[in-house]
Every structure is written in C-alpha cells, then in structure tokens.
Image (cartoon, rainbow, N blue to C red):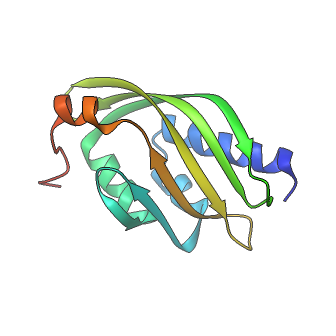
Amino acid sequence: MKPVEMIEYVRRYFELMTASNIDGIIDMFESDGFVLSPFLGRMQAPDFFHKLDDVSNASKLTVFDVLIGENGNTAAAHFEYDWTLASGEQFVFQGVDYFKFGQSGKFASMSIFYDTHPVREEVGDKYENS
C-alpha cells in the first residue's frame, strides 16, 4: 500500500468513527485484528468497537496529522475526540492511535494512546457494566 493510500485508509477510519458505523470500522480490521486500549486492555476489534458503541451516544473525531512509519506498514494519527456518552456526559481530549497494517492492507492492530487520568477522573469506569 502506498503512503497516500495508508493515510486515506486511516482518515476513513476516523470518518466511520464519527458516523458511528461500527460494522464499517470492524471491516477495516483483519479477522484477527485487535485493539490495545488504556481502559480495556487488549480486545479483538469487534468486541472493542461493540463495547465502545454500547457506552457512546455520539463521537466527533478531528484528525490533525497522519504519520507513516519508517517500515511502511504502520501509521499514527494525532486526533481530538469529542465523545458523548450514552449518559449524555461529554468529554473532549486529544490522543494518538497507532495502526499496524496486515498483509491484506487492513489494520492488524490499533493501539490507543492518551492521558487517561483526566478522563478516568471524570468518566470513571463506564465500561464496567457493559
């Protein structure tokens, strides 16, 4: 996959997140693709995104940069997440998602990085009952 195609693919992921298109997001991952989350640890991509959908009402993600890794099979995106929970609570924070691409060109994994302290302090563990 060419760098410009990787950038477009990553940006498409964020568009689908904003649209809450969970099936579309899951389809962007390899069948054994996984997510590493500060809140939830390692989860298979479908499980992670269904759980996220269960606790969310709306999401708006603004991508600032997409950077391609040196070996040509990774990308990192710096973004702002405007997240509205199912409870109506709203949080805005910045983070970085780090994507590894598989042989098929889909995501093999995604690692999420952000300062969890302010979010956990306000949100608590909203996933515990999901």
Count of numbered badges drawn on the protein: 0
On screen, residue 17 versus residue 108, left or right, reads: left
On screen, residue 52 versus residue 96, left or right, reads: left
Question: Residue at point 68% right, 50% down?
Answer: 75
On screen, residue 115 versus residue 25, left or right, reads: left
Residue farthest to the left, as pictured: 129
x%, y% of residue 94?
Answer: 46, 28
Placement of 49 over or under 83, stated as above or below: below
- The answer, for residue 61, to whether it is visible in the render is yes
- The answer, for residue 87, to whether it is visible in the render is no
x%, y% of residue 122?
Answer: 18, 28
Quadrant of image for the C terminus: bottom left
Question: Residue at point 33% right, 49% down?
Answer: 52
Q: Quadrant of residue 64?
A: top right
x%, y% of residue 58?
Answer: 37, 31
Q: Quadrant of residue 70?
A: bottom right
Question: Residue at point 40% right, 26% down?
Answer: 93
x%, y% of residue 9?
Answer: 71, 48
Placement of 7 over or under 93, stated as above or below: below
Front position in the image: 130 or 36:
36
Quadrant of image for the N terminus: bottom right
Question: Residue at point 21% right, 25% down?
Answer: 89
Q: Quadrant of residue 125?
A: top left
